[in-house]
Image (tube, grey):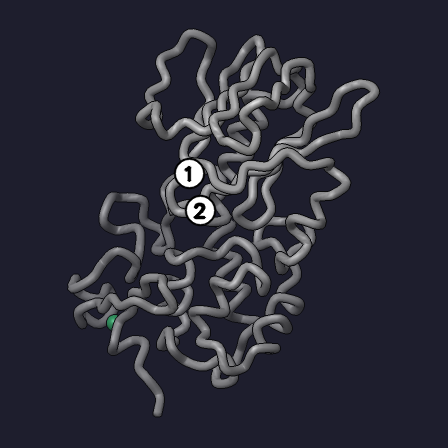
């Protein structure tokens, strides 16, 4: 599940593979950029903001540009050595290939692929709330943005990237479990919004630098989460069967005993 940590890790993969080098070729397999050629551009930086990936490109006498992509639920980037077999995903899912003398970066099932002047990144990303893994992370600002919509459910508020950028379904479900909050609780009834977003940030940040997304502190398969992906399995704390339901077109997992509905 690509969430803030996955996107952050992916930016580091692209950084190691590409940054500092000149592109020797590119192959865009998305209609809006089918004729774009990036050979000759230098990869100056690789970063993430929330769930958005940003490759910064420069070239003498040209305006610096940013290559933007979004992983949503199913996208991925892989880096290979020249000549190495591309083992990541089926080839029909490839949306973009970029090459340097020492690496080939292949983007699978990417969304929102766009090439924009770097100075215009704000136009694309300005709506995002504080980035959980950014240098500008701001607990109070994230809590303030959530509190501005008191009737929203707390689960919906955590997923809304305008409030804070980087939480997806997994960290949403796990954060609410750890705070004992029923996912449909209105924002107005959550006592400590600052503590809640601080916990979400800690969970996401704790998984930087590895691909296993653990919220329990355990890395063994089947033991990494409290509720996410554990429908009908016993709660690790109380033994009740974990529930799963649709909520605002997303999926929510929760423990009915540890996260009771208040009425
Ligand atoms: Zn429980």
Q: Which residue matches tag 1?
A: 75
Q: Say which residue appears at 44% left-offset and 26% top-offset.
A: 78
Q: What residue is drawn where x is 37% and y is 56%?
A: 170
x, y (%) of residue 164? 57, 61
Q: Residues within 10 Å of mark 2 (few under 14, many from 20)?
A: some
The quarter of the displayed image where residue 216 is located: bottom left
Disc 1 + disc 2, Cβ < 8 Å: yes
* Quadrant in which the C terminus appears: bottom left
**Closer to us: 46 or 152:** 152
Percent of width and height locating residue 258: 29, 75
Name the secondary structure under disc 1. Answer: loop
**Residue placed most toward the observer, 55 or 32:** 32
The alpha-carbon separation of the residues under discs 1 and 2 comes to 6 Å
Q: Position of residue 39 (x, y in %)?
A: 64, 14
Extreme residue toward the right, this view: 61
Disc 2 is placed on an element classified as loop
Q: Position of residue 80 (x, y in %)?
A: 44, 17
The residue indicated by pointer 2 is 72
Residue in the image at 53% along x and 66% along y: 197
Residue 221 lies in what quarter of the image?
top left
Q: Is residue 49 above or below residue 93?
A: below
Specify the quarter for ligand 1. bottom left
Q: Please identify the residue farthest to the bottom as the structure is shown.
A: 263
Q: Is residue 61 left or right of residue 92?
A: right
- The correct choice, above or below, for 134 with respect to 85 in the image is below
């Amino acid at each position: 599940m690509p969430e803030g940590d996955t996107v952050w890790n992916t930016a580091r993969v692209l950084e190691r593979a590409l940054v500092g080098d000149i592109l020797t070729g590119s192959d865009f397999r998305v209609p809006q950029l089918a004729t774009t050629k990036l050979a000759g551009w230098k990869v100056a930086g690789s970063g993430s903001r929330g769930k958005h990936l940003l490759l910064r490109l420069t070239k003498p006498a040209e305006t610096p540009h940013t290559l933007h992509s979004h992983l949503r639920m199913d996208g991925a980037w892989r880096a290979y050595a020249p000549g190495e077999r591309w083992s990541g995903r089926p080839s029909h899912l490839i949306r973009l290939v970029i090459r340097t003398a020492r690496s080939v970066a292949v983007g699978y099932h990417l969304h929102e692929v766009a090439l924009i002047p770097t100075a215009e990144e704000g136009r694309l990303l300005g709506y995002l709330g504080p980035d959980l893994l950014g240098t500008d992370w701001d607990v109070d600002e994230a809590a303030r943005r959530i509190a501005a919509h008191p009737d929203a459910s707390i689960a919906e508020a955590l997923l809304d990237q305008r409030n804070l950028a980087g939480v997806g379904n997994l960290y949403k479900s796990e954060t609410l479990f750890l705070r004992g909050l029923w996912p449909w609780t209105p924002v107005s009834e959550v006592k400590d919004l600052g503590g809640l977003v601080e916990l979400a940030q800690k969970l996401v940040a704790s998984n930087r630098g590895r691909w296993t997304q653990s919220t329990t502190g355990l890395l063994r398969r089947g033991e990494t989460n409290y509720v996410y992906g554990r429908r009908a399995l016993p709660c690790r704390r109380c033994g009740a069967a974990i529930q799963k339901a649709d909520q605002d077109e997303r999926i929510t997992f929760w423990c009915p005993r540890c996260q009771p509905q208040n009425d």
